[in-house]
Amino acid sequence: MTTIRNESILVVDDAPGTLEVLQRNLLSAGYKVFTAPGVTEAVRLLEKISVDLVVTDFKMPGISGLDLVRHIRENLPGTEVIMITGYASVSGAVEAVKSGAEEYLAKPFTEEELLQAVRQALEKLHLRQTAQHQVEKSPSERYGLLGNSTVMSRVLSTIAKAASVPATVLITGESGTGKELVARAIHYNSPRASAPFIPINCGAIPPELFESELFGHVKGAFTGATVSRAGFFQTADGGTIFLDEISEISQPLQVKLLRVLQDKEICMVGASRPHKVDVRIVAATNKDLEELVKKGAFREELYFRLSVITVNLPPLRERGDDKLILINHFLKKYAEEMECETPVISDRTLEVLNNYDWPGNVRELENLIQRLIVMSEDGKVDITDLPSQMRFTPKRTTGFTRPLAEVELEYICNVLDSVKGNKTQAAEILKIDRKTLREKLKNSHDKKS
């Protein structure tokens, strides 16, 4: 069964037999097809209808296909072109591409070669159109989160539900996906919006200080406690406390946090009696808590208490055209901050950015766009401006003879480069702690020495 497509194609060729074959092949692939026996007829037709792609012959009596390409490029920027010819030559290919043809096919070509060229041209057209019009299409900006993709629509729907009820929330997702943004969105769209929002990075607080930081301490509770001091829970009373990297807290502290969730009360370090607090807890992690529960590294009861509502943030590589929305957003944001013109990203560069895996997710994209604005010249961004891991490099000829340590170090260096040398972010992406990262870098340095 033929798949019906939305794209329309105009085929231009002075040979009736070729015109018929091209039309039949494209119709069988589900495209809407128009035909013209020459450039003059094609131009007239293009004045009446709008097409996504023109497939034109090179050599035709009177006006050549190159003239048609130039006409389309200067008058119809929303239309792509594929040039076909029976007179293939390097100079002809160069001239066609310079004139604006997206693809160059030499006769004879197979049906699959034709359809592949058509698919590639239409994909590039879609990419360009999305990049140009995504912001104008009013992308969803609810809660400070940008995205029109299906996965982000589900996230926004869950945020709305979570904001309307007082239940605890667990936000999961890879590093750099925007978990704190989601936590803030839930708080500032809830009845607690006027009360404090207190973010805490559980992985950044030394274990010996964690209980005091969270629950406070009374005077004399330990050496150096010269005055009583409130903890984060007292500061957040009436509002929301955001526990990022919740998987990093120790087992004893997990027990105390579970008690807070169950009894709605805390006990300051050194105090004899607990007291009530009214705090909503939103937690986040980039690790699989269920797996940690199975390994005995995270308490099952606490996991169930935290995950009454779960928000799963998708990685950037799974968000489709949201990448283009975010690129446009960050381009405008940092161009305004730096008081400069918004740079233009070339089609080739846009294609690379769209196909990149983004291991550091939105944070990596934001950092890159900021860097490109600083480093770009003449208001243009091309592939040569991108970090090395995004640019093409011929495959190594060493086969599978490289030691594991060398491959590992290369990947670590690529990740560090993607986050501008930020070891904390790199460690999060690599899912190792900073100490392990430092040791791996030190060991590699020692070996080189």
Image: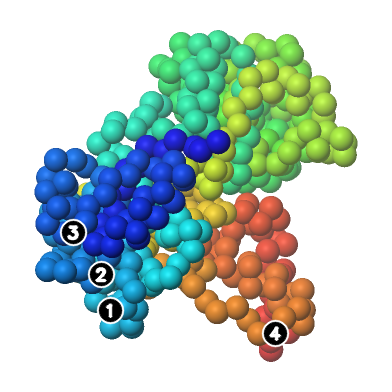
Q: Quadrant of residue 380?
A: bottom left
Q: In terms of sequence position, does the residue under pointer 2 or pointer 1 come before the other?
A: 2
Q: In terms of sequence position, does the residue under pointer 3 or pointer 2 come before the other?
A: 3
Q: Residues within 10 Å of mark 2 (few under 14, many from 20)?
A: many
Q: Residue under label 3, please give it.
A: 38
Q: Is residue 221 left or right of residue 312?
A: right
State which mark lies toward you, 2 or 1.
2
Label 3: state its secondary structure. Answer: loop
Q: Is residue 264 left or right of residue 116?
A: right
- CB under 8 Å between callouts 1 and 3? no
Q: In terms of sequence position, does the residue under pointer 4 or pointer 2 come before the other?
A: 2
Q: CA distance from mark 1 to mark 3?
A: 19 Å
Looking at the rendered structure, the kind of residue marked 1 is Gly
Q: CA distance from mark 4 to mark 2?
A: 43 Å
Res. 58 mark? 2
Q: CA distance from mark 3 to mark 4?
A: 53 Å
State which mark lies toward you, 4 or 1.
1
At 72% across and 62% down in the image, what residue appears?
Answer: 436
Q: Nearer the viewer, residue 35 or 212?
A: 35
Residue occupying the far front of the picture: 17
